[in-house]
Each structure stands twice: as C-alpha cells, then as structure tokens.
Image (cartoon, grey):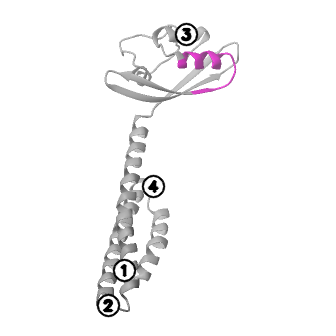
Amino acid sequence: MLGKGDQVLLINPAAKDLLGVSESVDMVGKIFSEIVRYPDLTRAIRVASSGEGSQKLKLEITDGDTIRPLKIRVDHFGSLSENHLLITIRDETESHRVDSMRREFIANISHELKTPLAAIKGYAETVELAIKDDPEAASHFMAQIHDQCLRLERLIADMMQLARAQAGTSFLHLIELSFIAPIEESI
C-alpha cells in the first residue's frame, strides 16, 4: 500500500520477494520507485495516482536464472487528496507452466489421434475394394479397423481422465458418456 508521494505504507514479505527486494530492506516510509525500479510499474502507479482508474500490467522479473511473470494491478482508493494506492501482485509462474504443459499435451494428443484415424481410413478404403474380391482380406481389415477404434477409445478415455483430474467429474462424465457411446455402438 502506498500513500501520498508514493511512500510505502505497508508491504508484506511475499510482495518484497516477488519484486526482487531483499527481505532485510525496510521499505516502510520510503519512496516505492526509489527501491523498486521497473518503468512500467512506475508509470502505472503515476497514472493510478492521478485518478485515471485502475491500472493493470504484466511484468517479468528476472532473479538470477529465474524469470518470474507477474500480473500487477494498481488501484486508487480513498479520497483523491489522500491518494492511497493498493498494488496487488500475482505470480503467474505456475499458470504459465500449466499453459505450456497444456499446449504440449494438445500437440501430443493430436499426433496420437491422427495415427489411428489415418489407419482406420486406409483400412476402410481397402475393405471397400476387397469386399467383393477377397472377403477374407476384408474381414482382416475390419478387425484392424476395430483395433484402431479401441485404440482411439483408450486415448479418449485417457484424455477424459486427465480432464477430470483438473475440472471435477460430474460435467465430464456426461461428456464422456455422450462421446464414447456412439463409438461403442458402431463397433
């Protein structure tokens, strides 16, 4: 929390850590921008203190080899003459890590789904050609189609299990039933 002249009124240890300020530094009573030197944050503080509304920004803090993405909000509260500001800081590191894992998962699963789909398509085309001339070969390819459908079902079940772990089970159970049931009926 900042007061008149951007003087630090309160700061917690987590905020100091996120901003890369040593825990031993006593910031209370000091000018915020003299200790924390990030031009975008200083600009947001200046705009919010002028009464132009809340300011939101994203900032990356480098601490040695670690880059920490932060989401920061600066809010003016109280009367304009008091000029109190509340700076809220959120560490987005975990969120970025999860997003990266999600993108990687989607890339992997789309690759995994393409393989059995391509096989099913190829087998279905072969069955169309062989059904009259070679019923035994057609039967073999139908078995391959069935195996690839089972593989797709397992992949989808794995995806649903992962999604359930993140979002809870009730909604996803309904999706799973409506999505997998038609596959089972067609086999």
Q: Quadrant of residue 112?
A: bottom left
- Identify residue for label 1: 126
- Identify residue for label 3: 7
- Identify residue for label 4: 167
> Of marks 2 and 1, which one's residue comes earlier in the chain?
1
Please give the name of the residue rendered at 39% of the width and 69% of the height, measured from the top-left corner. 117
How far separated are the C-alphas under marks 3 and 2?
Answer: 87 Å
Name which residue type carries label 4: Ala
> Of marks 4 and 3, which one's residue comes earlier in the chain?
3
Q: How packed is label 2: few (under 14 Cα within 10 Å), some, or many (20 or more)?
A: few
Q: How packed is label 4: few (under 14 Cα within 10 Å), some, or many (20 or more)?
A: few
Residue 70 falls left or right of residue 4: left
Residue 120 falls left or right of residue 7: left
Name the element at disc 3: loop
How far separated are the C-alphas under marks 2 and 1?
Answer: 10 Å
Name the element at disc 1: helix
Instruction: Indicate the position of residue 33 as horizontal and vertical percent values.
Output: 51, 11
Closer to the observer: label 1 or label 3?
A: 1
Q: How packed is label 1: few (under 14 Cα within 10 Å), some, or many (20 or more)?
A: some
Q: Judge whether residue 97 is colored magenta.
A: no
Q: Nearer the viewer, residue 29 or 67?
A: 67
How far separated are the C-alphas under marks 1 and 3?
Answer: 77 Å
Marks 2/4 in contact by CB < 8 Å: the verdict is no
- Identify residue for label 2: 134
Looking at the rendering, the stretch of residues picked out in magenta corresponds to 40-56
Q: How packed is label 3: few (under 14 Cα within 10 Å), some, or many (20 or more)?
A: some
Name which residue type carries label 2: Asp
> Of marks 1 and 4, which one's residue comes earlier in the chain?
1
